[in-house]
Amino acid sequence: MKRIFILAIVLLLTLIPFGCKNAPAATPGDGAQTLMPPSAGDAIEASNGNAISPADAGAEIKNYEELVAALNDTNVTRAHISADMEISSSEEQTFEREGFILTIDEGVTVTLGDGFIMVFFGSEEEPGVVVNGTLKIQGTMDFGAMTLLNNGTLEILSGGLLAPGMSTIENHGTVSIDSNGQIRLERGSGLQNYANLVNQGTIDITDDGGSLQNLAGATLENNGHIAFNGNYQNEGVYQGAEQEPQGAVG
């Protein structure tokens, strides 16, 4: 009996290693692999709220043909101009795109001629045109029912005319009107200056709802002419060769 018991123990000890080979214990490396969270790179890609996808930035525009194509495509709701270009048309073109947002990238210069009219761009929450670079107006820029936000430079060249209707120009950069250039604030349109407005030409504030506000902390330098028939308010600094318009508030 004792001999049979010893043989059973020997047989059991012989079989145990084979069982271990079929079901090995987890090594430290295997354990780390099982418990490890996603890699840092994957986490940043998934959770980085500052990363802007191409869809969020909108369609990239490098020439006039691409701009027209984007405006004619109802699936495109945002576009940004990334290269210097000229916008001009031999025939008048009106683009009515409610909610569409067009941005001029920082460091980019866009020169606008005649025949290009924008209506209903943007919304109550977002401006329709955002200038982070430079927008030069050498023809007539006539737009309606939208807000133009300038964070860079908006320049009305000699012979150029900026004539919005039922719209707002909000300036946080520099707006300059060259000699023989003109801004006409008419049909319920207003210019709100939060930064720098330099006039060497003409600012025409009409009596059909035109308004000009030079807000606190802003500077209006007027060495041209302000035709004041509408609403003019100054809470900032007024300077220049021409006397400040009568009836000014501030």
Image (tube, grey):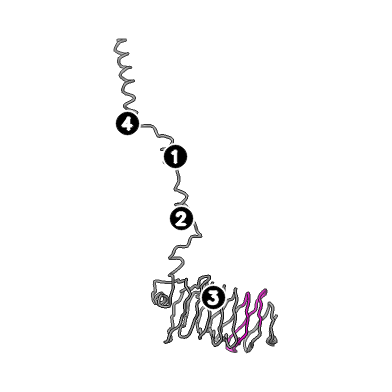
What's under tag 2, amino acid-wise? Glu
Per the rendering, the mark at residue 45 is 2
Distance of label 1 from label 2 (alpha carbons)? 23 Å
Residue 134, numbered circle: 3
Q: CA distance from mark 2 to mark 3?
A: 33 Å
Q: Mark 1 falls on what kind of element?
A: helix
- Dot 4: element: helix
Tag 4 residue = 22
* Residue in the image at 46% along x and 51% along y: 41
Q: Amino acid at mark 1?
A: Ala
Disc 4 residue type? Asn
**Lower position in the chain sequence, tag 1 or tag 3:** 1
Between 51 and 167, the one lying in front of the other is 51
Question: Label 1, on which residue?
Answer: 32
Q: Position of residue 191 (x, y in %)?
A: 59, 80
Q: Is residue 247 magenta?
A: no
Magenta-colored span:
193-221
Q: Residue at left 39%, top 32%?
A: 25
Amino acid type at mark 3 = Thr
Comes first in the chain, label 1 or label 4: 4
Q: Position of residue 137 (x, y in %)?
A: 52, 82
Front one among 186 and 154: 154
* Coordinates of residue 145 in the picture (x, y in percent): 50, 80
